[in-house]
Amino acid sequence: MNIKYKVPGTLWLCFALFFGAQAQTSPVKSMGEVTNAAVEGQQVKITTKNAYALISVYTPSVIRVRIDKKELGKDFSYAIIAKPQQTKTSITQTDSEIQVVTDSLRLTISKKPFAVSFFTLDGKVINQDETGLTTSWVNDAVATYKKMQDGERFVGLGEKTGPLDRRGNGYTNWNSDVFGYSTGADPLYATIPFYIGIHHDLNYGIFMDNTWQSDFNFGASNNRFSSFGARGGEMDYYFIYHKNVADIITSYTALTGRMQLPPLWSLGYQQNRYSYYPDTEVYRIAQTLREKKIPADGITLDIHYMDKYKVFTWDKTRFPDPVKMNSRLKEMGFKTTLIVDPGIKVEPGYGVYERGLKDDIFIKYNDNTNYTGEVWPGWCNFPDFTSAKGRNWWQDEI
């Protein structure tokens, strides 16, 4: 099954690069030749004809690449928690290239034009920019193009439709509520801009850190290159090389952080559907699972346990005694999980809404009024989870 790649994304950029008529209406800008390169510790600061780049060694196996059309701004990320480690690094340069060598890999930065290539210490190609494309822009959209190696396979991107091997497909990351989606639907609910490339017994990972709508092309409609990019912002990605996939994932999660060890029961079977109500139906499901000796550790309640879909409430008709129900399920060996939605109904007198207003934790428009959107309860405000105040408020409500 092939998922057709969306032209407005990075595939549009490669169309523009190859077809001059397209480029006339949406001019393409490539990085061009390197005009200056300065070594600062484990970093290389680069200026090209049309852009700026910063190459940073994070660990012997992780190298960060930042690129923008304008001078790079403040280093900030919602995703990355790791800081660069003090790493034994050799950086040398000639008129034609810059070499960055660690105990794990070698990075070559070509100057005419700018391009990056990653090699093993014995000279095998792990990953390299596509000649003539490298990193380019169409207006504000940016994309980095990588030469596909013979037999290269791609896995990753998290919750997506399509085959495990992503080669030949293109995907968009733009978190969307896709109720009852088909086997070819895209985009879906989550954005996981990380993938692993595999070829010739070599493995590497790439994590792109950009919050704009993004696109990944693993050879959709071409057999020459893969690409990843975003509709705006800078190109910022982390290249990870290890001899095995497990270590790549370890390095990736060291960058972005790891969840706490989940309770053992959460790894068991969880009975769930949309939706169980009233409480007598929940009891019936639990009893049936036990009678049929179907192993199950949990039952999840969807939004119908709420009072008119308002988060942190109970429908007193459908669930008159939640504490009693939970205790009874616990006696039967079940953990009860409740869905919670971050849409806070705009309703004077609704305690959760009033507390959110008082603590000023909602997302705002540019004019400082609260952003409003319509979801299950009706018109809602939404906590700003990018702020510690918003996150702490939500935790307290739970």
Image (cartoon, rainbow, N blue to C red):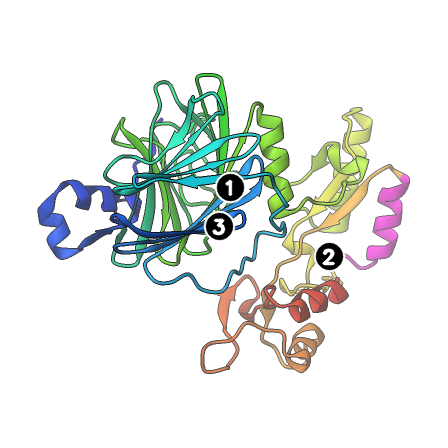
Relative vertical location of residue 320 with respect to residue 373 in this rendering, above or below: above
Q: Could you say which is closer to the camera, residue 341 or residue 136? A: 136
Q: Which range is magenta? A: 319-331
Q: Earlier in the sequence, mark 3 or mark 1?
A: 1
Q: Main secondary structure of the magenta part?
A: helix
Relative vertical location of residue 131 with respect to residue 294 in this rendering, above or below: below
Horizontal and vertical percent position of residue 361: 63, 74
Q: Could you say which is closer to the camera, residue 351 or residue 164? A: 164
Relative vertical location of residue 149 with respect to residue 356 in this rendering, above or below: above
Relative vertical location of residue 153 with respect to residue 345 in this rendering, above or below: above
* Mark 2 vs 1: CB contact within 8 A: no
Q: Which corner quadrant holds the C terminus?
A: bottom right
Q: Which residue is mark 1?
A: 63
Q: Residues within 10 Å of mark 3 (few under 14, many from 20)?
A: many
Label 2, label 3: how many angstroms apart (C-alpha)?
A: 44 Å
- Kind of element beneath mark 3: loop
Name which residue type carries label 1: Ile
Q: Which residue is mark 2?
A: 318
Q: Earlier in the sequence, mark 2 or mark 3?
A: 3
Whether residue 120 is visible, yes or no, is yes
- Kind of element beneath mark 1: strand
Residue at the location (49% across, 49% down)?
43
Q: Which residue is mark 3?
A: 209
Total marks shown come to 3
Nearer the observer: mark 2 or 3; the answer is: 3
Residue 321 inside the magenta-drawn segment: yes
Q: Which corner quadrant holds the N terminus?
A: top left
Name which residue type carries label 2: Arg
